[in-house]
Image: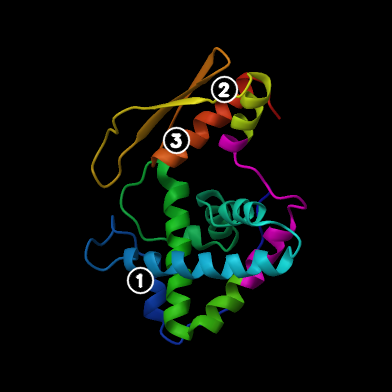
Amino acid sequence: MATLNLTLKYKFRNPSLMELALTQSGADQENNNERLEFIGDRVLGLVVAELVYTMFPNEPEGDLARRHAVLVSTETLARVAVGLKISERIHHGHMTGGRMRHMFANTMEAVLGAIYLDGGFDAAHTVITEIWRDLAASDKCAPKDPKTKLQEYVQKVANGALPVYEYAKPVGASHSPEFTVTVTALDHSATATGTSKKLASVAAAKELMKILAIS
C-alpha cells in the first residue's frame, strides 16, 4: 500500500498524555501506553462503526463488518502511525522487525485514547473521522480478508470443503509470543507466523492464496 501523508490536527491541553501514549512497556514497565491503548481501541471501534454506517447506507451488516475489520486492523493502524510520523517518536525497548508494525498500531490506538481523555469524545471523533473517512472511501466495494477469500474459493471448487488450519504451540516470551499456523486446502499447504493466532492465520491464508494463484 502507498504511504499515507497525514497531519494530526489536535493540540493537547495536557502534553504528558501524548508522551505517555508514545511510551511502550519495553521502555517503562510502570508508566506506559497499555491502558491508553485499551481505551483508544474502543473509541476507534465505535467511531469507525458509525463512519461506515453513515458512508455506506445501502450495505448489509456483513459488508459493514468487513469494512470495519480492515479499517481498525493492525495493518491500517500501523499505516496511519507511519503517515502521522508517530512511528518515529515512540519510546521503546529492544524491538525485532517482525513486531514493529504491531508496536506502531498499538501506539496509534494509545494516541487516540490520549486524545479522548484530553479533549473528550467529540475531539477523538473529529480526529478519527478526519483520517479514516478517506481510508474508508478508498474501497468502493466491501473488502474481504484473506481467510474469507480463501474459504469462498475452496468451497466453490471443492464442493463445499473448507481450509483446515493447524495451530502450533506459541514460542518466545510470554509478553511477546510468536504463533505459527499452517493452512491446508486443495492438496496444498502454507505456513506463516505472527504475533497472534489471528495474524498468523491471515498470513498463512495469504501465502496459500499465492500458491493457488487466487487474486
Quadrant where the C terminus sits is top right
Mark 2–mark 3 distance (CA, rounded to whole Å): 21 Å
Query: Which residue corresponds to mark 1?
Result: 20
SS of the residue under disc 1: helix
Q: Nearer the viewer, mark 2 or mark 3?
A: 2
Farthest front residue in view:
159
Query: Which residue corresponds to mark 3?
Result: 200
The residue under the point 55% across, 12% down is 187
Quarter location, residue 158? top right
Mark 1–mark 3 distance (CA, rounded to whole Å): 29 Å
Q: Which residues are magenta?
A: 129-148
Mark 1–mark 2 distance (CA, rounded to whole Å): 48 Å
Q: Which mark is residue 161?
A: 2
Where is residue 151 shown, x and y percent of the image?
59, 31
State whether residue 55 appears in this view. yes
SS of the residue under disc 2: loop
Where is residue 63 shown, x and y percent of the image?
66, 52
